[in-house]
Amino acid sequence: MKCNQLISAILFLCSLQISAQVYTDKIVGEKNQELKDSLKIANYPYSLPIWGEKVAQKGYNLPYSAGLSVNYFWQDSEIVISNLQVGFNNGPLHNLDEIVRFDKSSVEVGAITIRPDIWLLPFLNIYGVFGKANSTTKINAGVYIPDADNNWSEVANFSTKANFDATTFGIGMTPTIGIGGGWLALDMNMAWSDISSLDKPAFSYIFGPRLGKTFKLRKPERNIAVWAGGFRVHISGDTNGNINLSDVLDLSNAQVKVDNGLAKVSENQEKVNVWWDGLTPAEQKNPANIAKHNTANRALETAGNFLTTVDGALSTAGSSTVQYSLQKKPKDMWNFIVGSQFQFNKHFMFRVEAGFLSSRTQVLGGLQYRFGL
């Protein structure tokens, strides 16, 4: 289902928050005086970062200015869908937001990303991200209508599952502050995910503040860093698309569900009419009764028109198409992040990170190689 593919693409975009946990470190303390003095007299051999030589000679230990990371990312998350409008065979769109309710929709994604980066300034890292993802999305939804007592019940339901591949690219930057082995990184990026079945790439903006500390080990250049922080996702809200009816509905039992739904709509409409006709003129002028009557009639009319249109589309199901418009957002914009990185030397780093404490769970592992430019 094309809608499923878009939702999965959005969750894949969330995997692009992959910041390099290296930084410009101020050398402090008497035990590090020899290293600090050697930095002050050394000639900085690289063009980047800008002002690199001046910063190094003031006692800062700079990372290599360029890097390449390879990461594997897994995530399971929930997303909220609203303002759903659906039409068939390029006919008018039906606003179904009042009668369609989505149950828990889960998205599981696995992605491999490559991330080249440079330190443009001693405190500013610039990077790009290129990735491939495989994703599985499950969506459950039902059509609900009211009765004369304004009790809503489900008259039809559908479940869809989609698998897809996506290609993604993004750009980002990470301002950092490093003080005596501790650091603050404010990672942010924009990314676009391209899927052949979507009209245009899906867009996201991600912000991830992290606060961490590095513990030096006995061997030179070897250390372990740990950090904690947050992960915030913002995605573009409006989506329009066109898909085949057979990609949305299980055609083996769709006709039975539609027939049962139409019968239930007719039954509830009769109950609403009997209730309304049984009211006195004074009761029919009661604002509460008017609101209940209007709500029931509107919802039943929407459900009836929609199911009737589906019924007609099923007669030519092999060639029928579905047009849709919707808005989507993550169920939770924020989740908590913890992570660690082992630096074997200034060239090689190994990283793991986990996110939790919300409707989004994620795990990342990666290898980074750095070199001077």
Image (cartoon, helix red, strand yellow):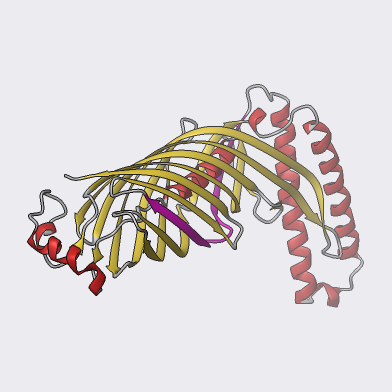
Query: Which is more toward the observer, 55 or 175?
Result: 55
| Residue 151 locus on image (x, y percent) | 84, 62
Query: Which is more toward the observer, 357 or 42?
Result: 42
Q: Is residue 333 above or below residue 244?
A: below
x 45%, y 52%: residue: 236
Main SS of the magenta segment?
strand
| Residue 216 locus on image (x, y percent) | 35, 61
Query: Which is more toward the observer, 250 or 73?
Result: 73
Looking at the rendering, which quadrant does residue 242 occupy? Answer: top right
| Residue 163 locus on image (x, y percent) | 59, 33
Q: Is 197 displayed left or right of 292 in the figure?
A: left
Looking at the rendering, which quadrant does residue 115 occupy? Answer: top left
Q: How many marks?
A: 0
Q: Looking at the image, can residue 93 be seen?
A: no
Q: Quadrant of the C terminus?
A: top left
Magenta segment: does it hold 227? Answer: no
Q: Looking at the image, can residue 13 be seen?
A: yes
| Residue 325 locus on image (x, y percent) | 55, 45
x 86%, y 65%: residue: 149
Identify the magenta region. 321-343
Q: Is 201 displayed left or right of 179 in the figure?
A: right
Query: Which is more toward the observer, 327 or 299?
Result: 327
Looking at the rendering, which quadrant does residue 263 occupy? Answer: top right
Q: Quadrant of the N terminus?
A: top right
Magenta segment: does it hold 342? Answer: yes
Q: Is 86 displayed left or right of 230 in the figure?
A: right
Q: Is residue 143 above or below residue 62?
A: above
x 20%, y 60%: residue: 122
